[in-house]
Amino acid sequence: MIRRIAAASALVAALISAPALADTSGSIRLSGTVAQTCTVAVTDAGATLNILSGSSNVAVGSVVENCNDGAGYTITVASANNGTLKSSATGAQAISYTTSYDGTSGSGSSFAVTRSGAQFNKTAAVSVTVPANAQAIAGSYADTLTITIAGK
């Protein structure tokens, strides 16, 4: 009886220590995620506009666009003064102007430029045209353009 128990114990030990049978192939699933990233780097050219004689397509800045949205993205150009240069001088009237962003023109409070796919390091020129206004009141005139980017 002791011999039988010892033999059974040896058989169990052999089964436990035997290597497991393996398949001939297997697979490992890999995955990753890329977050949507859209940015603009805006450079102000420090340009001065000639209000009395007018200014035509004066380069006022440039923008470097980066957006990894495959469906594209939208650039919005917004004016703080609804597309006018304003002065705090007594009697000064607001002076309307037109903005061009990468060849697309707009005026008023804002306009949009749509890109149909992802772009990386796309440089866009920003220019402004101001009609001549020989009767402009003396003073400093200003507005601020804000450029924003949003993926689709």
Image (cartoon, helix red, strand yellow):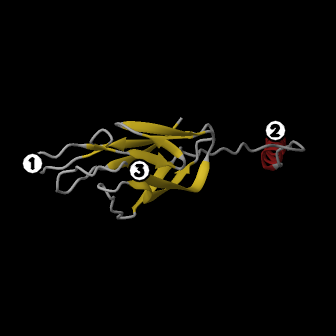
Residue 66, position as x, y percentages in the image? 54, 52
* Secondary structure found at label 1: loop
Q: Residue furthest front?
A: 134
The tag earlier along the polypeptide, 3 or 2, is 2
Q: 107 or 61, which lies in front?
A: 107
Q: CA distance from mark 1 to mark 2?
A: 118 Å
Instruction: Name the residue tied to disc 3.
Output: 129
Q: Secondary structure at mark 3?
A: strand
Measured as percent of width and height from the top left, residue 64 is found at 51, 57
Q: Earlier in the sequence, mark 3 or mark 1?
A: 1
Residue position marked by numbered label 1 in the rendering: 90
- Answer left or right for 94 relative to 91: right
Q: Earlier in the sequence, mark 1 or mark 2?
A: 2
Residue beneath disc 2: 1
- C-alpha separation, residue under disc 3 versus residue under disc 1: 24 Å
Counting from the top left corner in percent of width and height, residue 139 is at 17, 56
Q: Is residue 5 left or right of residue 132?
A: right
The residue lying at 61 percent from left, 37 percent from top is: 71
Q: Separation of disc 3 and disc 2 at Cα?
A: 108 Å
Q: Position of residue 72 (x, y in %)?
A: 59, 39
Q: Nearer the viewer, mark 1 or mark 2?
A: 1
Question: Badge 1: how crowded within 10 Å, few (<14), some, or many (20+)?
Answer: few
* Residue at 12% from the left image edge and 45% from the top image edge: 91
Residue kind at label 3, given as amino acid type:
Thr
Q: Which class describes the residues within 10 Å of circle 2: few (<14), some (14-19), or many (20+)?
A: few
- Residue nearest the observer in this picture, 137 or 9: 137
The amino acid type of the residue labelled 1 equals Thr
Q: Quadrant of residue 77?
A: top left
- Tell me whether circle 3 and circle 1 mark residues in contact (CB < 8 Å): no
- Quadrant in which the N terminus appears: top right
* Observer-nearest of 128 and 31: 128
